[in-house]
Image: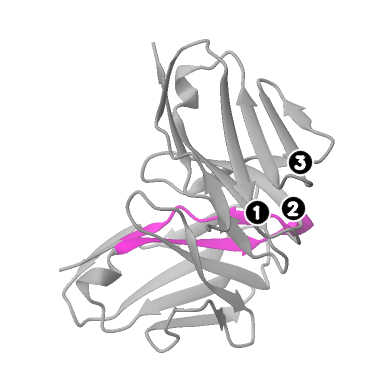
Amino acid sequence: RKEVEQDPGPFNVPEGATVAFNCTYSNSASQSFFWYRQDCRKEPKLLMSVYSSGNEDGRFTAQLNRASQYISLLIRDSKLSDSATYLCVVNQGAQKLVFGQGTRLTINP
Amino acid sequence: GAVVSQHPSRVICKSGTSVKIECRSLDFQATTMFWYRQFPKQSLMLMATSNEGSKATYEQGVEKDKFLINHASLTLSTLTVTSAHPEDSSFYICSALGSQETQYFGPGTRLLVL
């Protein structure tokens, strides 16, 4: 079983749609959780941290369920510029980040 | 935000040669830096953790004699791919650990070994 598992997609959705990504992790001792986005041939960039209470940043909402070892990301009113690969990332301690394989998203005009 | 640079951004070399990649934290000091590798359509995989003034810690399956890491200052870590072969062709990305334990990623180095 992969340490961090994501649906690889690709997701193709029209502009303005709502998109949801899911992620599961296997190490119950994992300490912190993040969503990164990676554009083609570029480095990953932090999108947001994920907290158990859930957190929102504009059109983006992230949720963490520690009991189920499940992380989600919701993008509302999607824009063309949201097209990217979204990476679920888990900090297993000692700053060791484990990356999911990523979910590729394409927003169509 | 914090800035991390990598040099070179891309390199093409012949099989058997060695390639050095530099990772610099430009506006902060980083006692810890990380080296990742990403093959096409795959995720980032941590290769090693680089600590200033001490030996790097390598992940299982990563040969320390092939991937030499030097972290001689608080702003510079280098990764040398020794005797590179075509299977070493990949996207190498470093990150530097900044404040609040946030990792800041460099722009990556694309290595192609012919």
Residue A63: image quadrant is top right
Q: Which mark is residue A65?
A: 3
Q: Secondary structure at mark 1?
A: strand
In terms of sequence position, does the residue under pointer 3 or pointer 1 come before the other? Answer: 3
Task: Count neighbours of disc 1 (C-alpha within 10 A) and say few if under 14, some if 14 to 19, many if 20 or more.
Answer: many
Between circles 3 and 1, the one closer to the viewer is 3
Amino acid residing under circle 1: Val
Q: Amino acid at mark 3?
A: Asn
Q: Which residues are magenta?
A: B90-110
- The answer to whether residue A19 is magenta is no
- Local packing at callout 3 (Cα closer than 10 Å; few below 14, some 14-19, many 20+) is some
Judging from the image, the colouring scheme is: one colour
Q: Quadrant of the C terminus of chain B?
A: bottom left
- Main SS type for the magenta part? strand
Question: Disc 3, disc 1: CB below 8 Å?
Answer: no
Chain letter, disc 2 residue: A
Q: Position of residue B38 (x, y in %)?
A: 40, 58
Total number of numbered labels? 3
